[in-house]
Amino acid sequence: MKSRRFEEGLKIRRAVLGKEHVDRAFADRDEFSLMRQELMTEFIWGGIWARKQLPLKIRSLITLAMLSGMNRSAELKLHLRGAFNTGCTKDEIREVFFQAGNYCGTPAANEGLRILDEVLAERDKKGKGA
């Protein structure tokens, strides 16, 4: 039986990143990979993202800023998709990258904006708009 924190984390993770993505992350994994997915779900999503002090939208924007500054493009793209699921607008996201450019450097901002354009193009193809 999974903990309450795991179950809450799984709910939030699916709401932010999408059920399909999360289910793929848990599917066909070896013991180590499955353990890593369970720990991330329980402690990151159920322990941090589930805290009520900040809404998911703000947590998404903070995450985008940090991932941009660390130049983590794959995670950034994943969390950009999730940011729209938490109610972030493209204008708010752009502002995060402009702000990151001041503190993390222009290359970080440029990469974030480039990936945002990719995600927006994907959303347009799926008819989700911005």
Image (cartoon, rainbow, N blue to C red):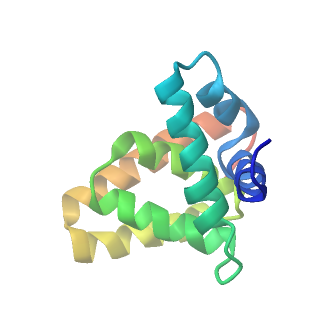
Where residue 87 sits, quadrant-wise, is bottom right
Q: Position of residue 89 (x, y in %)?
A: 63, 64
Q: Quadrant of residue 128?
A: top right
Residue positioned 32% across, 71% down in the render: 100
Identify which residue is drawn at 40% across, 66% down: 65
**20 or 8, which is in the foreground?**
8
Of residues 97 and 40, the one nearer the viewer is: 40
Q: Is residue 19 visible?
A: yes
Residue 58: x and y in percent read 60, 74
Look at 72% across and 32% down and name the residue there.
Answer: 126
**77 lies left or right of 105:** right
| 20 is higher (above) or lower (below) than 87 | above
Name the residue nearer the viewer: 89 or 66: 66
Query: In the rendered image, which quarter is residue 45 located in?
Result: bottom right
Instruction: Please state, as top left, top right, bottom left or bottom right, where the N terminus lies in the image.
Output: top right
Q: Is residue 7 left or right of residue 88?
A: right
Q: Is residue 119 above or below residue 89?
A: above
Residue at the location (55% across, 46% down)? Answer: 39
